[in-house]
Image (cartoon, rainbow, N blue to C red):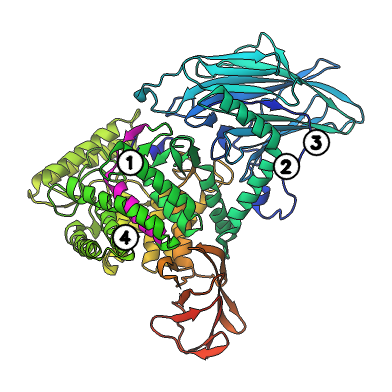
């Protein structure tokens, strides 16, 4: 599937433990203004939109009314339910309550409201059976292949109530997408009642995939016979158990459901069941504490409270997308529900992770991509897409290898991790050999192949591949120099300089005021236009815009055919990646400003740049984010924040607490690379943080948007240090404070010059040099006073 197409559409054992227990607090009542603590409600709207209950080993997807319809496209109708990768366990579960005294029954089919927390979700139901109040809370423990679901029932009446809860489960033990290409075929499930333990045991008939559910304490459940089959997709089996619930006058009870799994054996599944039934309360406390620590790390305070909230939540969203799969590895997946596995393009997200204090996850993902790419390719090429059972649908678009290399360099800048640098340096060099030898057939420093857009036919020397390759050379030279490999470092820097010059010479089209989509021959240009036409015509139903795009490409073909047959830059789609020279800051300022203005005037829709300015069909968070970073690199803070604001506008549109892949509300309902357009403009530009952890140096060069005066970032990890920085306007002047936990670091404060100003460093008068203010020690204070 193409990146553009991806934008527009979008083990195992079940242990199902029902426990009567004293209910735990479902949410904190303190700090109600902080949505990451108290959750975000859908306010009863968008009830048929999806949600996720996420853990690193398991996640559950249903709809915000509490139901489990067939959802998704990669495995048609099967992308929701409970997944413990590389397999799915169940399609869902459904509860029916019966009043034993009156025999009146009700199915809990639709909740009235939904609240999303970083660590779980809560559903609230309208009162049933004469006023009984019901809430459902669920979370997935970290480090365990399972999900815990709890129903809390409250009796407001002054008389005892006796209820019977019947819980039906539809198993669906089935493999992840692309498994059929690996020879893995799904088979029907069986579900049997174990009389001794009073639990169900289910398995796939062809594979060692198990599902078990029961009640705790043992013996509390009873088999329900003759259960109607639940009609969701897949050859699963329906089974049900019933449980007696006694509600004291004005009292309550809790039913606890624990879903666990193993794709290897029944024994492993039963061990997971035992661990979660015994420890789920402590595991919830640990999960809350972990998310609390995540939000506290690299926390910011800025005047734009909505943006501050989104900054917190995009970091939370990334944790939902971590897939930790035995025998495969741990890394950041792309998005839910369609892309829970791993992608070479996730390097955008990894740069944002490093810049916001989660470098460990960035390093783990880079290792996973390196290892899976070595298994699939073995030549330095980084895979585009690898599923959680090792299936590779695309062995790698060319720009992904370059992005991988440059991202390793960025992570080293933040962490100063020399062991990681030594570990990854061979992969960086091998990747460059693949780029500059294997896929640069004419040796002009422009590697051939598809870039991020994957437009049919655009298998040429494209702009994003050239730009990211230039940056890969820069970062490999930096790492080589750090490791004392000076001769290759010098060669890489020389190649980087030559490639930068060639990008300007060959990709820039002066009469258009733009970089071309690609560099090539007339025949290639005609082939690209033909490919674009074919791709548009692949759509099921052509719109008027589609027809207009086809007409545009036909006219382009005619104009290309009439032109001279020389190698040059061509514009066919006006793809958003023409901004990449500005994104990395190598475009000359005059050209950059000219093109940035042109994009804003001509190629921007309601939420940012069109993926293709010709077709004007979709806008994505990554393209808008790249545009924000591009503006920031040229000091245009307000313009950068305008694009950031467009991303923020789409917050909560589908899933409370998240942003969709295709703005405002299409594609994956949560997507990792949204981080790039939020974190990078804030951390690298507004706060102006430029780390050099290897040399224990950090530069702060803040650029405040119009109307901002006071900004703070605290507990920002750089190597093993934690830094805090603030800028505020006071009666004394403009004050900057920089605190560190460790001695031995150099801090440079730049960009603070004002006309006719006096400068004081730690209470003493100081002069301001062209390189800024040099600071030492754990605590520093700089005061700028206008005369």
| 4 vs 2, front mark | 4
Alpha carbon distance from label 3 to label 2: 12 Å
> Dot 1 corresponds to which residue?
373
Q: Residue at x 44, y 77 (%)?
A: 750
Q: Residue at x 38, y 63 (%)?
A: 631
For residue 680, what is the image quadrant?
Answer: bottom left
| 3 vs 2, front mark | 3
> Dot 3 corresponds to which residue?
22
Q: Is residue 318 above or below residue 738?
A: above
Of residue 722 and residue 651, the one placed in the foreground of this image is 722
Alpha carbon distance from label 4 to label 2: 47 Å
Alpha carbon distance from label 4 to label 1: 20 Å
> Dot 2 corresponds to which residue?
26
Magenta portion: prevailing SS class: helix
Check residue 475 in the rendering and tell me which mark sits there, or answer none.
Answer: 4
Q: Left or right of 698: which side holds 559?
A: left
Q: Position of residue 428 (x, y in %)?
A: 30, 53
Residue furthest to the top in view is 226
Q: Quadrant of the N terminus?
A: top left
């Amino acid at each position: 599937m193409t990146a553009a197409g991806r934008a527009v559409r979008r083990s195992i054992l079940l242990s199902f433990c029902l426990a009567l227990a004293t209910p735990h607090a479902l949410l904190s009542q303190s700090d109600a203004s902080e949505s990451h603590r108290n959750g975000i409600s859908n306010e009863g709207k968008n009830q048929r939109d999806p949600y996720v209950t996420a853990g690193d080993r398991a996640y559950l997807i249903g709809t915000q009314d509490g139901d489990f319809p067939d959802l998704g496209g990669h495995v048609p109708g099967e992308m929701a339910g409970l997944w413990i990768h590389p397999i799915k366990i169940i399609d869902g579960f459904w509860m029916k309550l019966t009043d034993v005294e009156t025999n009146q029954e009700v199915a809990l089919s639709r909740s009235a409201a939904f609240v999303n927390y970083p660590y779980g979700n809560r559903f609230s139901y309208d009162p049933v059976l004469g006023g009984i109040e019901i809430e459902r809370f669920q979370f997935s423990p970290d480090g365990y292949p399972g999900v815990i679901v709890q129903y809390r029932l409250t009796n407001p009446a002054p008389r005892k109530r006796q209820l019977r809860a019947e819980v039906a489960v539809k198993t669906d033990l089935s493999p992840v997408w692309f498994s059929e290409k690996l020879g893995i075929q799904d088979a029907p499930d069986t579900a049997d009642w174990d009389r001794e333990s009073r639990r169900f045991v289910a398995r796939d008939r062809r594979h060692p995939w198990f599902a078990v559910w029961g009640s705790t304490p043992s013996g509390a459940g009873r088999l329900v016979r003759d259960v109607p089959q639940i009609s969701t997709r897949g050859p699963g089996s329906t089974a049900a158990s019933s449980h007696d619930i006694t509600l004291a006058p004005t009292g309550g009870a809790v039913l606890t459901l624990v879903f666990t799994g193993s794709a290897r054996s029944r024994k492993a599944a039963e061990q997971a069941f035992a661990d979660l039934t015994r420890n789920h309360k402590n595991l919830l406390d640990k999960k809350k504490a972990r998310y609390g620590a995540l939000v506290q790390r690299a926390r910011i305070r800025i005047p734009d409270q909505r943006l501050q909230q989104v900054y917190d939540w995009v970091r939370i969203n990334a944790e939902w997308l971590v897939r930790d799969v035995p025998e495969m590895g741990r890394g950041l997946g792309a998005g839910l529900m369609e892309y829970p596995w791993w992608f070479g393009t996730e390097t955008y997200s990894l740069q944002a992770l490093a810049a916001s204090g989660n470098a460990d996850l960035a390093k783990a993902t880079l290792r996973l991509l390196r290892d899976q790419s070595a298994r699939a390719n073995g030549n330095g090429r980084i895979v585009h897409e690898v599923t959680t059972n090792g299936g590779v649908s695309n062995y790698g678009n060319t720009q992904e290898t370059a992005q991988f290399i440059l991202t390793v360099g960025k992570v080293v800048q933040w962490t100063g991790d020399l062991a990681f640098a030594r570990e990854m340096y061979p992969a960086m060099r091998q990747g460059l050999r693949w780029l500059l030898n294997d896929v640069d057939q004419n040796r002009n420093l422009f590697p051939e192949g598809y870039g991020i857009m994957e437009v049919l036919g655009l298998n040429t020397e494209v702009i994003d591949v050239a730009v990211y390759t230039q940056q890969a050379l820069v970062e490999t030279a930096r790492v080589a120099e750090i490791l004392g490999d000076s001769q290759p470092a010098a060669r890489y820097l020389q190649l980087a300089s030559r490639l930068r010059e060639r990008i300007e010479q060959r990709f820039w089209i002066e009469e258009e005021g733009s970089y071309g989509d690609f560099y090539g021959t007339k025949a290639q240009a005609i082939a690209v236009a033909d490919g674009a036409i074919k791709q548009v015509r692949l759509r099921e139903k052509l719109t008027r815009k589609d027809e207009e795009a086809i007409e545009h490409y036909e006219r382009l073909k005619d104009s290309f055919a009439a032109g001279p047959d020389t190698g040059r830059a061509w514009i066919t789609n006006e793809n958003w990646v023409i901004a990449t020279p500005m994104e990395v800051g190598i475009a000359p300022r005059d050209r950059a400003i000219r093109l940035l203005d042109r994009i804003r005037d001509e190629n921007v829709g309601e939420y940012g740049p069109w993926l293709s300015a010709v077709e004007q069909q979709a806008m994505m968070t990554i393209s808008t984010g790249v545009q924000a970073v591009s503006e920031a690199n040229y000091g245009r803070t307000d313009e950068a924040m305008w694009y950031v604001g467009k991303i923020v506008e789409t917050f909560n549109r589908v899933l409370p607490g998240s942003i969709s892949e295709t703005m405002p509300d299409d594609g994956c309902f949560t997507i990792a690379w949204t981080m790039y357009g939020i974190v990078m403009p804030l951390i690298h530009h507004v706060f102006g943080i430029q780390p050099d952890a290897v040399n224990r140096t950090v530069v702060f060069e803040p650029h405040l948007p119009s109307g901002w005066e006071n900004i703070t970032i605290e507990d920002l990890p750089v190597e093993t240090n934690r830094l805090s920085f603030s800028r505020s306007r006071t009666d004394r002047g403009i004050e900057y404070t920089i605190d560190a936990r460790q001695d031995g670091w150099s801090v440079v404060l730049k960009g603070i010059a004002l006309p006719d100003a006096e400068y004081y460093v730690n209470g003493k008068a100081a002069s301001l040099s062209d390189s800024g203010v040099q600071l030492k020690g754990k605590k520093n204070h700089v005061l700028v006073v206008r005369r």
